[in-house]
Amino acid sequence: MKIDTRSIGKVLGTPDAWRFVLLHGDDSGLIREYAASLTKKAAGSLDDPFRVSLLARDDHPRFDEEATALSLDGGRRVVWVREGTDGLATATAAVLDSPCNSLIIMEAGALPARGKLRKLAESRPDSASIGCYPEEGRALEASVRRMLEEQRVRITSEALGWLVGRLGADRAGVRNEVEKLSLYAGENGELTLEDVLVCIGDSGSASVDDAVFLAMEGDRAGADLALERALSEGANPVAVARVTLGHISRLRRVKAEIERGQTRAEAMKTLRPPVFFKKQQSFERALDAWSLAALLDLAQRTQTFEFACKQTGSMDVLLCRRHLAGIAAKAAAGRRR
């Protein structure tokens, strides 16, 4: 059965309703989180040697043996398979057609829609196929707010908007940042924009911010250095694209207000959240470098760049370096004019 986004919570909360759950897609952190949640719900813990069998890629030959074994304490066994491939489809189908009642949880990467594992999971009523892809926009905002609520921490809308625009695409990275913020705020605390800037400002997300701001003002050398720092700290090229789109959107908003007759200072005051005071000069230099039409064209090219990064097998880091270099070159030319 193919599970849509709205029904994922029900699947994770009712492991007894399923015999096979396939977790596939591009977000390895989200896949691992779902697998761990389902395993804990079904077996009570992640490391019970009598009820949980964890099979890495080298352990795949033991799949039949583990999937058909009986639990020594009478509870239901969980067979948690990592790095699943279509090569396991035949063995999985055989186990599902047998009388054994183990729950098979299989992690896989990006699988083709017509692949054997996906066809198997989507065609059977006792099986679930869950696509795990990087969240963005409102979906990511909702997830971050929910994670913070689990820690009894509140966050202002201004702080949440800034944070979401700078988080990476991988769920594990998002959760790490949320946990850091939760520790800073403390139980029943509230995070403001200033709090988030203090906590996240020295991480890879700050390097991404620096790289985008410097590129947009035409500083090629500075943008290159900041980007390499961000990449070395684990930044994702898709996150770079999203920060770039957010920066372009804010520049366009200010440009539009100026064309309507407002002064630059007045137009910049309309931004929420406001431009961080350390970035104001860089923001204004970018305003000098780009016209409204050029910003619209750059937004479209950045969306194309983001889409290219998400393609299977794409050289996303190379595309990222090339895209920011092109932005810096065009900005420098715009400022000279």
Image (tube, grey):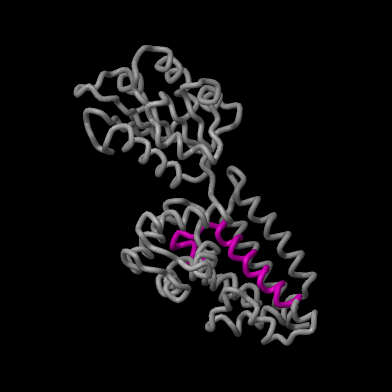
Q: Is residue 46 left or right of residue 129?
A: left
Q: Residue at x 45, y 45 (%)?
A: 30
Q: Tell me which corner region of the image, top left, top right, bottom left or bottom right, holds residue 253.
A: bottom right
Q: Is residue 272 left or right of residue 50?
A: right
Q: Residue at x 76, y 66 (%)?
A: 296
Q: Is residue 182 left or right of residue 117?
A: left
Foreground of the two, 27 or 5: 5
Percent x, y for residue 229?
A: 47, 68
Image quadrant containing the C terminus = bottom right
Q: Residue at x 26, y 38 (%)?
A: 45
Q: Residue at x 25, y 25 (%)?
A: 75
Q: Can residue 232 be found in the magenta stretch? A: yes
Q: Tell me which corner region of the image, top left, top right, bottom left or bottom right, holds residue 209.
A: bottom right
Residue 179 vertical placement versus 101 (above, below): below
Percent x, y for residue 7?
A: 51, 37
Q: What span is in magenta?
A: 228-256
Percent x, y for residue 268?
A: 65, 81
Q: Can residue 229 be found in the magenta stretch? A: yes
Residue 146 vertical placement versus 126 (above, below): below
